[in-house]
Image: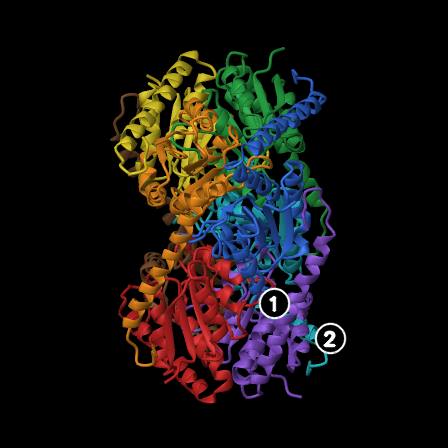
Chain colours: A yellow, B orange, C blue, D red, E green, F purple, G brown, H cyan
Amino acid sequence: MKPVVSIIMGSTSDLPVMEKAAKILDELEIPFEINALSAHRTPAEVEKFAKGASDRGIKVVIAAAGMAAHLPGVIASMTTIPVIGVPIKASLEGLDALLAIVQMPPGIPVATVGINGAMNAGILAAQMLAVGEAQIAGKLSAYKESLKDKIVKANEELSEVKFKFKTN
Amino acid sequence: MKPVVSIIMGSTSDLPVMEKAAKILDELEIPFEINALSAHRTPAEVEKFAKGASDRGIKVVIAAAGMAAHLPGVIASMTTIPVIGVPIKASLEGLDALLAIVQMPPGIPVATVGINGAMNAGILAAQMLAVGEAQIAGKLSAYKESLKDKIVKANEELSEVKFKFKTN
Amino acid sequence: MKPVVSIIMGSTSDLPVMEKAAKILDELEIPFEINALSAHRTPAEVEKFAKGASDRGIKVVIAAAGMAAHLPGVIASMTTIPVIGVPIKASLEGLDALLAIVQMPPGIPVATVGINGAMNAGILAAQMLAVGEAQIAGKLSAYKESLKDKIVKANEELSEVKFKFKTN
Amino acid sequence: MKPVVSIIMGSTSDLPVMEKAAKILDELEIPFEINALSAHRTPAEVEKFAKGASDRGIKVVIAAAGMAAHLPGVIASMTTIPVIGVPIKASLEGLDALLAIVQMPPGIPVATVGINGAMNAGILAAQMLAVGEAQIAGKLSAYKESLKDKIVKANEELSEVKFKFKTN
Amino acid sequence: MKPVVSIIMGSTSDLPVMEKAAKILDELEIPFEINALSAHRTPAEVEKFAKGASDRGIKVVIAAAGMAAHLPGVIASMTTIPVIGVPIKASLEGLDALLAIVQMPPGIPVATVGINGAMNAGILAAQMLAVGEAQIAGKLSAYKESLKDKIVKANEELSEVKFKFKTN
Amino acid sequence: MKPVVSIIMGSTSDLPVMEKAAKILDELEIPFEINALSAHRTPAEVEKFAKGASDRGIKVVIAAAGMAAHLPGVIASMTTIPVIGVPIKASLEGLDALLAIVQMPPGIPVATVGINGAMNAGILAAQMLAVGEAQIAGKLSAYKESLKDKIVKANEELSEVKFKFKTN
Amino acid sequence: MKPVVSIIMGSTSDLPVMEKAAKILDELEIPFEINALSAHRTPAEVEKFAKGASDRGIKVVIAAAGMAAHLPGVIASMTTIPVIGVPIKASLEGLDALLAIVQMPPGIPVATVGINGAMNAGILAAQMLAVGEAQIAGKLSAYKESLKDKIVKANEELSEVKFKFKTN
Amino acid sequence: MKPVVSIIMGSTSDLPVMEKAAKILDELEIPFEINALSAHRTPAEVEKFAKGASDRGIKVVIAAAGMAAHLPGVIASMTTIPVIGVPIKASLEGLDALLAIVQMPPGIPVATVGINGAMNAGILAAQMLAVGEAQIAGKLSAYKESLKDKIVKANEELSEVKFKFKTN
């Protein structure tokens, strides 16, 4: 089994957030790898990773970073594979990471999801893969359908809430 | 008893905030319903709700959402009933939800209250109903009068605070 | 003809923004008045206005203010008529006015629209009136329908845009 | 003993912050009073307070408020006594209260201190009183001198910190 | 020629920004369509578009919106095709649109680019298509290579700048 | 005639803003001086000014600064005269100057007015002087009364605005 | 042993942050001193320190401050030694301190690091010393090399994370 | 003449800002070079530059970038020469660039100056060089002295401003 999605994070402190990306890829049965790389501490390794990813069969990169979050942009500058950026909340409520990832200059986009939005990064990776692979699209539709169950459950819980003038 | 106000929230995690809206409507003896609906996870149900609300006798909708909070605006786009939006604090201190609710384009307003301002949403709904129903206006006046009691109590507490140069 | 909506602004410099509220009320054939009042410069007049509005037949107040925008909240504290607040962009991109209007304490809501959102304030006022008056609801539906025309026109314009790989 | 400074707060929940204003006034032996008043819940009482303050011998008002903090500005609109505004951190890290207090329109200033800056409000009140009363200026100089002691103490603590290449 | 990318914008006032997306798709010889749709003014048309896009052969959607920018999220809630969101600067320097697009709830991602980042949206769309189509990857590599020319040119210009202590 | 208020600014580029402080002091017949001093470029002169102000008869200092606005705080650290800080809008919409002035540490307050709020700084200075001088209080009351005239004028202008459903 | 770097902080409450600067200087075997000084509470001592630092052999100053953080700028105004500013997070997530330190006027720079970025301040001080001392450059290179070890360790930890579709 | 300072910018559009850095270095007679390099468009050239700078005799790098400004951090990750970062105002008032430059992770500092603060970047570079070269310190002292002249001139201009109650 060869990975098609590569999850990159700067340190294992990001793992509690980023394992949500892993979990959803696992549910959707998409092979992936997880590695730690730092744009600032291991620039040579980042370069090696970014330039070799396509040849290793990686189709989408998910890169997470906090603060002056350069990792997603640095990878994006070295490959034409789509890079999904996950801003990690480490300071300033995550606003610094969001801006440092999303405000890329013309020519080098990073597909940015919300602050700590690792689960959405996983889904977005699957959506990108589904562009070329109809089977994944089917799984995504099923997953999307399943989201409604939470709402059904929520309504059941809400029906337990009692007020005199509550009518349902 | 048919509901005239409908409280909508994206998930039961919003309930601790939103039950303040329910509580004040209950105090003001205004029949209401509470449901969970998600602009993003159950768009079809949101549409059905929004388009049918008026015919079911709903006069005002209170919709709560956090982050990229689309629910109030999406409902407002499908009905002419006034929609009150409650920004839920889930990230960025609630600023994202506030802006995503209040900054609606020309043509489709959402009556926005403060971040986590569910109680005010309930009162505002009552004020809107009072436009057509004098009896509710009377209840609101009585309620408004009662707000002063807190201040009286506060002053009693403050009279207990002791400083040498405090004169009251 | 007696006014049912009252538009209040702090100075005539707000008129270029606020006349959009007047214009939409005019289109919807809702009688209204426009006055200048300042929470800070004419507090006595504001009080007189707020306390007498209901008896004069005013059903909804639209209050516009910039910077430390107190006018909508001050009026709301003195009446149970719903007050719609319009944050005027005068400094800090209008963020100061938005926060000073929307972040009202529990008990005294202001129905806030977007920064410089005068047109939406007018529509929201009409929606509130429609709670008690079915005829206005009909006009609002017609108005809402008309919004689509802009989109139709926009698409006609876009069909003129020429690119080699543009397919429509 | 008649108060010359009046501390006003919206609710007793502000007391833990505001008692620092009381404490410093007490240290400086300046008679003061503390009361609870709400711009939004008790506008009539605020008006009565603001208009009567000067005649009762009040020379400076310290007014604290959070969120859409109108209290200092509303008082300032009804008196020519200087009003010191204390933004209380209740939401958005206190930025909403700061902007709602400091960004007053031309004509009606509020002397604003930092977020939760109650102690500085007390000192500023004393500085204003000292404009007309030389004795207070002397106490303030003594107080200012005493601030240095904290730094001396801090340096003693820092001298305990041990590092191999630390030279002091 | 059938379109594989669909560019959606709320009004023709977004065209000066969004035609940069069209231009780069044209350069990369990727068939696309451009339409105007409004999440708030034409919700039914948005639904029809979103649900039918996949069957019409659309592989990627680029959706632009300003202020309380719901369009990308609303489309994303109704399809599993990847949606690229372009925040348009219309107020608050575009921060409102950015947050309203990027901060999507778990389950429904929007691939967000920078404020007014239409060109990057076009490139990102091509990168997504290249996941399934090797030929586009080649064009993207060539494009990426061409970006360096600007830098070469910039250096030529800079060599013209004269200072006494400038050494190059 | 000896000055009792001293207006300090960092450079003559602040004059268009700060002359509003001068103008209102002139109207209120309060002797004042205007000088340029820079906390960063002329620290020795600032120190000399701050330490000598009281002995020269200065009762209140108005200090204006932009960006990392240290001037008001630096003066406040060297005197017990009240210092009024005017944040000048030079970058970041003036938010940097506002925070750099208002967020003073415990012990050293600066009485901060709004961004570019020079006129209010002048009025606040007069209010402080009036603490010890009843005559100025009278002038301030008269001035406050005159603010209403603008509103009267505004209403006259608004009465000229014509709409079919406008009732006044 | 004479210190070449001087660490200055406003109070011992900053020590938990600032000892990271001390620790890295210790590791790099660079003699340093730590003192408490306050721009606002001990301006005379700050002046004495700043003016005498160069003669005492200090080559770089690291100054930490929170809120309206003037200390780094005030020192920078009185010496030509480079001053590194560390914004301390004490309110508003540290944004106030960051802006009050970094936004210095033309002529007087402060080399600003991130919020609570004491460790980086220590490294930056070493980098500045290395401009004139080749030996420190060598130590910095070794230190930089060591940063990679964390990444190696992180990857070992990540290899322990188990998912069905995880391939590494 | 070999350069000791290297000024790097992403494009010639940054030149109007960055030539202020060149100008002050020229005045201080410090040899420098100016080049265009892009972290995102020419990563290989950036790497080559960063790794070779020290051997070429470069002592300090000044790197300017806007938006998701990665250039200074990327260079800093590849050298132990101090890197001065200049946030360029290109969007969001420059706040995005400031945060993307200053909020570097532990281990890799960037010495950040204010938004568009190119002149200060030049001075800071000179200050760093002066750590190892006494002669530059002398020039900096002379320069610092000259800053006072602006203030003298400003006071002359201010003495021309005429008001009735202006005393100087």
Q: Amino acid at mark 2?
A: Val
Q: Nearer the viewer, residue D33 or A91?
A: D33
Instruction: Name the element at disc 2.
Output: loop
Residue at 34 percent of width and 60 percent of height: B149
> Where residue B88 sits: x, y (%)?
40, 42
Q: Which mark is residue H161?
A: 2
| Relative height, residue E16 to residue E94 (above, below) | above
Apparent side of residue F119 relative to residue H106 in the rendered image (left or right): right
Q: Are marks 1 and 2 on the same chain?
A: no
> Label 1 vs label 2: CA separation?
23 Å
Instruction: Please tell me how crowded label 1 is: few (under 14), some (14-19), or many (20+) other residues with Cα within 10 Å.
Output: many
In which image quadrant can residue B12 be found? top left
Reading the image, the residue beneath label 1 is D107
Apparent side of residue B155 relative to residue D68 in the rendered image (left or right): left
Residue G59 can be seen, yes or no:
no
> Where residue G79 sits: x, y (%)?
52, 70
Contact between marks 1 and 2 (CB within 8 A): the answer is no
Instruction: Name the element at disc 1.
Output: loop
| Relative height, residue A26 to residue E91 (above, below) | above
Q: Amino acid at mark 1?
A: Gly
Residue A71 can be seen, yes or no:
yes
